[in-house]
Amino acid sequence: MESQLWMILLIGAGTYLFRAGSLVLGSRVQWSERTKEWLAYVSPAVLGALLGPLLLLNDGQWIPIKDNTMLLAAVPTVAIAWWTRRLLFTVAAGIAFYAALYYFM
């Protein structure tokens, strides 16, 4: 239990320092237009790398689409996110879609 607490604290401190450092240094650095264009692709790539395995795999094995509640809930949630561009509404819709699919499947 104590080692888990230390891990959580260290990860939190690392995350905070990384974000604070990028805010402090990012405002002082003049980025070229090409670098700005390249950096615009980083967030979607990281999001895809995190969500892809979560939505498609379970213990390294593909989840059949008919049994994949998370993927089936993610599709309308992405549509809601694109349409509304509101984080709170998107999260609420995602939870509602997942709960409904989990209940009816």
Image: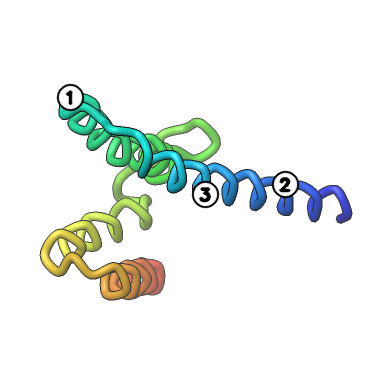
- Dot 2 crowding, Cα within 10 Å, few <14, some 14–19, many 20+: few
Task: State the quadrant of the N terminus.
Answer: bottom right
Residue 95 at what x, y percent from top left? 37, 71
Q: Residue at x 18, y 65 (%)?
A: 85
Q: Is residue 29 above or below residue 71?
A: above
Query: Where on the picture, by quarter, is residue 51?
Result: top left
Q: Residue at x 24, y 62 (%)?
A: 77
Task: Return the residue at label 3.
Answer: 20
Q: Secondary structure at mark 1?
A: helix
Q: Amino acid at mark 2?
A: Leu
Q: Is residue 38 left or right of residue 26?
A: left
Task: Return the residue at label 1.
Answer: 34
Residue 47 at what x, y percent from top left? 35, 42
Q: Residue at x 32, y 74 (%)?
A: 88
Q: Is residue 95 at least partly visible in the picture?
A: yes
User: Distance of mark 2 from mark 1, alpha carbons?
Assistant: 34 Å
Closest to the observer, 49 or 105: 49
Q: Earlier in the sequence, mark 2 or mark 3?
A: 2
- Dot 3 crowding, Cα within 10 Å, few <14, some 14–19, many 20+: few
Q: Is residue 104 at least partly visible in the picture?
A: no
User: Distance of mark 2 from mark 3, alpha carbons?
Assistant: 15 Å
